[in-house]
Amino acid sequence: MQRPPVDRQAAGGLQEMTVTFDLESVEGVAVGVARGSLDLTEIKESMATLWSLASGREIRVLWDLRDAQFDLSAGDVLRLAEFAKQRAPFNNLRMAFLLTKDLEFGLVRMFEAFRETKDAQIGVFRDKKHASDWIASSAAQ
């Protein structure tokens, strides 16, 4: 399922943002792919959409953010982690984040530090095979 692209050209010339979700290609894993510039509101909406699509099952998520840029402050990362703690459906939530850019990698590592609990495990990766292996090994358990 693909969320329609948001035209952000009028809002300061930022790159168009798209988020797609795939619940079928990898057994037991929901894959979210984001491209373009994402702000706090768009990230929260994407998380909530994915949680609603994956409800009723153990949640395993691979977020492919290699082509995404974040428009976030450190305070936004903390607010995002609090949002996820309050709103995420638990039952063994496990999320792998795949990133290549240093800034986004660092912001997601901050999210990991704020968010991880015994019921929610987070892995941050630069290599797709490592991310896929980590999330797939948890789906097989």
Image (cartoon, helix red, strand yellow):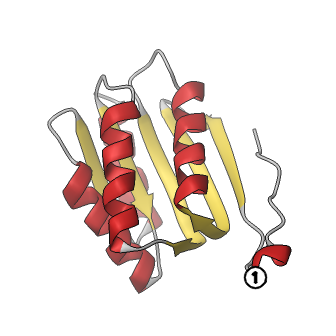
Q: Residue lying farthest left? A: 118
Q: Where is residue 102 shown, x and y percent of the image? A: 40, 84
Q: Residue at x 20, y 59 (%)?
A: 113
Q: Residue at x 37, y 42 (%)?
A: 84
Q: Nearer the viewer, residue 22 or 26?
A: 22
Q: Amino acid at mark 1?
A: Gly
Q: Residues within 10 Å of mark 1 (few under 14, many from 20)?
A: few
- Residue 10 appears in which quarter of the rendering? bottom right
Q: Residue at x 40, y 32 (%)?
A: 87
Q: Residue lying farthest top? A: 56
Q: Is residue 42 above or below residue 107?
A: above
- Residue 26 visible to the viewer: no
Q: Where is residue 109 shown, x and y percent of the image? A: 28, 67
Q: Where is residue 99 shown, x and y percent of the image? A: 46, 71
Q: Which residue carries the number 1 mark?
A: 12
Instruction: Say whether residue 98 is left or right of residue 48.
Output: left
Q: Where is residue 78 shown, x and y percent of the image? A: 30, 59
The quadrant of the rendering that contains the N terminus is top right
Q: Residue at x 61, y 55 (%)?
A: 42
Instruction: Say whether residue 46 is left or right of residue 130.
Output: right
- Residue 45 visible to the viewer: yes
Q: Secondary structure at mark 1?
A: loop
The quadrant of the rendering that contains the C terminus is top left
Instruction: Say whether residue 80 is left or right of residue 50.
Output: left
Q: Nearer the viewer, residue 25 or 114?
A: 114
Q: Is residue 46 above or below residue 106?
A: above
